[in-house]
Amino acid sequence: MRRAELEKMDLDRLWTLHVEISDVLKEKITQQKQRFVDRLNRLEQPLSGRRPYPRVSPKYRNPDDPAETWAGRGRCPRWLAKQLQSGRRMDEFRI
C-alpha cells in the first residue's frame, strides 16, 4: 500500500488495519520461532546412533605420580611413552 493511500484513509480504518497487521505479525513470528526451536532440537540430537560407552577403569599408573593413570585406550600418555623408551616394560605399570 502506498503512503498516499494510507493518508487518505480515516482513523478508524487505519486503526483496524494496524490491528490486522499486528495479528498477522504475531502469528508469523510465532511460526518462525517454532521453526527455529524445531531446527535447534534437530541439531542437538546426536548425529550417529552410537550408544554412550561406560567409563573404563585405569589399567596403568605412573609410579612417579600415582594420580596419573591410563586405561589403555587412545594415545599412549607421555609419561608412559618416556618410561617405555627408557627400556621399562608395560607390565611394570599395571595396577
Image: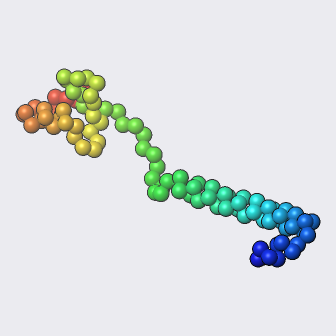
Task: Please name the residue shown 31% across and 32% down the image.
Answer: 58
Percent from the top left, x then y, of residue 21? Answer: 80, 65
Q: Quadrant of the N terminus?
A: bottom right
Q: In this view, does 58 lie above or below 8?
A: above
Quadrant containing the C terminus is top left
Residue 15, given in percent of the width and then of the height, sits at: 88, 63
Residue sitting nearer the eye, 6 or 70: 6
User: Is residue 62 shown to the viewer in this render?
Assistant: yes
Q: Residue visible at 28% across and 24% down? A: 67
- Furthest residue in direction left, as rendered: 87
Residue 77, image x and y in percent?
A: 22, 37
Q: Can residue 89 be seen by looking at this rendering? A: no
Q: Residue at left 62%, top 58%?
A: 36
Residue 88 located left or right of residue 16: left
Judge by depth and name the residue closer to the eye, 81 or 94. 81
Residue 20: x percent and y percent?
84, 66
Image vertical order of residue 50 relative to residue 3, above or below: above
Residue at point 28% right, 44% down? 74
- The front one of 57 and 78 is 78
Residue 26, located in which quarter of the rendered image? bottom right
- Residue 80 as seen in the image, left or right of residue 47: left
Horizontal side of 30 relative to 9 (left or right) equals left
Q: Is residue 30 left or right of residue 83?
A: right
